[in-house]
Amino acid sequence: MRLNLYEDRNNVDERVDIYYAKMRPVIKQLIDTVNSERPTLSGRPADEDLDDGEEIILDPKEIYYLDHIDRKLFAYTRDGVYRLMQTLSACEQMLWNYGFVRVSKSNLINIYKVKQLKPDVNMKVYASFDNGERICINRSYKKSFNEYLVRMRRMGQ
Amino acid sequence: MSDRTKQFLLELCCVYTFVSVMGAIVNIIAGTETNNANVLVMFATCAIATFVLYLHRLFDGVSPLVMIIVQYLVACALIGLMLLALSILVEPITPRGWFEYFRSFTIPYIFLAGLYYYRVFSETRKQDALLKKIQEQKARE
């Protein structure tokens, strides 16, 4: 995508025009940014030794997956684990445009961070990430996961 | 009637219709005939098979392999009970009869389980390829 920036100090009507062939996730993300609706997640380090009381803004692009354990929501990034204050379903709604899809009752994964989808010998299907971790794709969510991939592919074409 | 019962009965109707139509076709081709007892056994077998397959919702947390094995054992136990009842109430079943019945149940079960196994692997391969395309698309943008 080509980006043109025009600086005009006398401009009183700042605007952003987006020319697109088809509405797709990246365009929706740009719209969110212009409308200041870009989702941001704030969390605190799950490790109490690293928690200095300040909330850290997390970019969804940096998150590998979200895990809901014992009524607490955690975001896993390359650098660490953060506890979020949102609910998993709120995150699911907020982040579906950003490649996040539900794969089990307690997990939301970022498909852009998945290195490989692979079944085990026991027929469980796992999504492996480049940090070596893997998350099981539950059978009940297999259909919706597949539909999500097809939709994302179609939207991107 | 609960939604689950309705769903179960609907699935049982579909399975029994399919099996009886297939049975009729086989009878026409082979020139054989069936009797009332066979029809009832066929219905009972369909009910057991549908019930056992219907249990898959209870096994969401375990691996499909474990689910297949447990379902097979449950099906074997239920079929064994059915045959025992038939043996007592209708006509004693010979050891050969038991063996034949379990064999004719086990072979299609193993075949279908293998098919399921293959489907899991092939579907995952397709999903993985789709995922790679989405990631390439994103990288281009």
Image (tube, coloured by chain):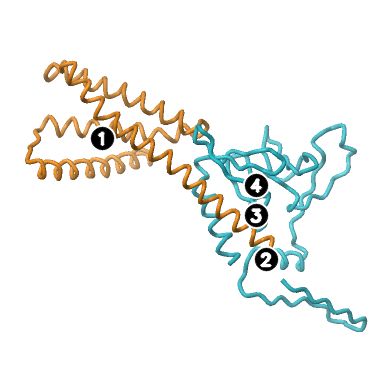
Chain colours: A cyan, B orange
Q: Residue at x 59, y 53 (%)?
A: B131
Q: Chain of mark 4?
A: A
Gap between marks 3 and 2, in whole Å? 12 Å
Give SS at disc 1.
Answer: helix
Residue A98 at x, y percent in the picture:
67, 56
Type of residue at label 4?
Answer: Lys
Gap between marks 2 and 1, in whole Å? 50 Å
Which circle's residue, 3 or 2, is located before the other in the chain? 2
- Residue carrying label 3: A99
Frontmost residue, B100 versus A38: B100
Residue B130 at x, y percent in the picture:
55, 55
Callout count: 4
- Residue carrying label 2: A28
Left or right: A20, with A125 as reference point: right
Q: Residue at x 84, y 32 (%)?
A: A48
Residue A113 at x, y percent in the picture:
68, 49
Frontmost residue, B54 versus A150: A150
